[in-house]
Amino acid sequence: MAQGGGNGGRPEYDDMPAGAIATGAVDLIAPVDAMPGQLIRLRDARLAADKPIEASPEDIEAARLAICATLRTRLGHDFSGYKDKTFLRRVQRRMQVLNIAALGDYVARLERDHDEAVLLFRDLLIRVTSFFRDSETFAALDRTVMPRLFDGKFADGAVRVWVPGCATGEEAYSLAILLREHMDARHGVPKVQVFGTDIDEAAIATARAGRYPASLLDGLSAARRARFFTRSDAGYVVAKEIRELCTFSPHSLVRDPPFSRMELISCRNLLIYLDADLQASVLPAFHYSLVPGGVLVLGASESISLHEDLFEPLDKASHIFQRRDVRSPPLRLSGWERHGQRSTARTMPRETPLNWPHESTRVEADRVRSLGRDIARETAANAHRRDHAGDRPPPRAGLLGALKRFYAGSADAEGVRDLRETRDRLRAITEDHEAALEELRAANEELHSVNEELQSANEELETSKEEIQSGNEELHTVNAQLSEKVDELARANSDLKNLFDSTDVATVFLDRHLIIRSYTPAIGGIYNLIPSDQGRPLTDIASRLNYGGLREDVEHVLDTLEPLERRVSRTNHDIHYLLRILPYRSPDSSVSGTLVTFVDVTTIVRAEQHQRLLVDELNHRVKNMLTVVVSLASQTLNRSRTLEEFSEAFMGRVHALTASYTLLSRENWQTVSLRDVVTEETRAYQSPERANIVIEGPDVSLEPQAALAMGMAIHELATNAVKYGGLSVPEGIVEVTWRLQPDSGDPDLVLDWVEKGGPPVGPPARRGFGMTLVERGFPHELAGEAKLAFEPNGLHATLRAPLRVPAPAAPR
């Protein structure tokens, strides 16, 4: 029962009831104020549960068959072989939950309600299981059976184990743990496979996940719990090495063919729910599945009394049996044909005692002889009693004679018929007796299960009561302190989360054997980790690092207890990390592992690389600048007639270089704007009264070499205009424009220098050093061309050079 309403029809905290409802195990959903009435009704119905259903036997049987047909149609599983009383008790329980009194009404409800069919199906499948349930049985298996499974088998062999009716997998995993322990103690072990099957697909899904609450591991030793399970938020997870031994799949003992070549079958507390006829088909199927000498394990309330010719006791106290080396009887599957008709194998009449072709002749003969001896004795006793009563004694001699003639091969038709009828009566009596015993055992198992559930619920209620009382007593004294601690913890968690988010530090916590304990999400960029990798060695996980010395470095840190730092990079060297390995100290100051962090230092590495590049570039530029200065000085000196002329020309060119270098230094020797270069080189000649220099063009970035060459060319054109051209008179102007002209590769930069309003100009009789720098130096530096046209209106210079698109600058 789950709380479906509280204040205003909803609970104040709905996580608990919502989680309980989601499990599918809740029968009733009701508000808190309606729960007492529901509980009283269920109590009254439980008190009346022992009363028989008020219907005739014929109606009960018809209803049972109708319910089985509905389950078969809806879910594909046949429960007609389920023991009648157990089956009806489960039906009666569902009727009590739904408050249905008449059996016919429940049949009608089941036919129209698919969800009710699923709930009844779950109730019929009793999941009473746990790890290493019945420890004495597992001790006997460990002592007696496990060594037999591995004897004489090596790496090329196989050990196959089948757990039919495995429910949620605890039995299968328990056997896998035993097998794993024996494998660890041997060399060259065979391949081990544990098959767990059940008709409950929800239980199979739970078994495959291998996740269990902590309460189910109470029967495990601390060593096994630590060795074969991993702690998780919701409980424990079965270790991967155990899960890899187990395969879980849906399978019906009633409908599907049995597995084959099995060394061990553990089918405990399943047969008690099947009627004798269905058991008669299941146990021979187990005999068929086992290899010669294979082992069958049954529950404490189960036996092989009807099939002692197929199995012999190996450990009678623990209900462990060994397969006899006899021919298996034909399989009798109660499956359904393609068109929904019942298989003939299920409805065939039972074989008569003399129908020997399906059994060993020797075994049947021994059975007939034993039966004959019992009929000697019984007939003689009856004859003695009837003789004293004055009745006529039966023809004992005739029956014994018939038996003698039967053994001698000369019995008539009459003697064989009498023998058959007598044996049939004895078999019916025996079967009725066994059925009664099985029903009592099933009832005992159910009572045991209910008792366990009630005891567990009672313990939980007692624990909850004690916790509530203790909490109420301490609430007033610790509430303020607790609130303060919670606030501190929240702040600490928030600080820690913000720290990790801001620094984006990839961190992984390892134990002393490099087993992953936990990690931060940022580690995903380095190792391909998923949540299920916790519990695996980090060295088994593929990484993106160009680094193979993790194990050695961790061992070094554990040996020296000193932190270690190392710079590593990804395989393609695009990202660089500072690896730090520190000892992980427990609260008691002992070292229980290591803490491995990866700090992204790509920006620092690139900055270092860029710094080295800048130093190299600076050295190169200084050398080139000195060479240029020396060349300028030499050429200017050679072409100057006086010292004053040399000083003026040389200093002007040095200032031009200085202006370009200043721009480049300001931009950290990356790129500079062409507009800034032109503006800086013409700044000294711009008139404050009017715009005598017009500068227009798109935004263009120049590399250092292009900026220096362009600056020197603009300087020479400007000084020439001041001396002889458009800037030599007040009314003259200079237009400096540029454009990008597309080409097959990088575009060409075309700059036009046009002088207007100055004195008439013509080609000079002698080329000065300035014009030589423009016409020859500019093409030499930039692989371009420079054209000078001395037109009547003034000089028109065109500078053209391929513009190489600069590479992206490294981050600062």
Image (cartoon, grey):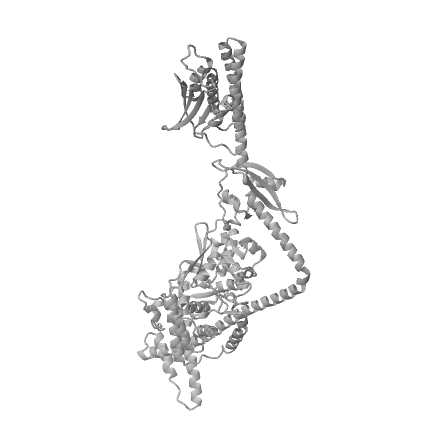
- When asked about the image quadrant of residue 564, the answer is top right
Is residue 449 visible in the rendered structure shown here? Answer: yes
Q: Nearer the viewer, residue 171 or 672?
A: 672
Q: How many marks?
A: 0
What is the residue that sits farthest to the top in this orientation?
641
Is residue 290 visible in the rendered structure shown here? Answer: no
Q: Is residue 205 above or below residue 707?
A: below
Q: Nearer the viewer, residue 794 or 806?
A: 794
Percent from the top left, x then y, of residue 503?
56, 42
- When asked about the image quadrant of residue 70, the answer is bottom left
Q: Nearer the viewer, residue 494 or 583?
A: 494
Percent from the top left, x then y, of residue 298?
47, 65
- When asked about the image quadrant of residue 733, the answer is top left
- Left or right: where does residue 275 sit relative to residue 466? left
Q: Nearer the viewer, residue 54 or 154?
A: 54
Q: Is residue 393 above or below residue 775?
A: below
Percent from the top left, x then y, of residue 81?
40, 71
Q: Is residue 216 above or below residue 57?
A: above
What is the residue that sits farthest to the bottom in this orientation?
390
- Left or right: where does residue 467 sit relative to residue 451? right
Which residue is at a point 47% across and 67% down the rendered structure image?
Answer: 126
Q: Is residue 687 above or below residue 303?
A: above
Percent from the top left, x then y, of residue 716?
47, 18
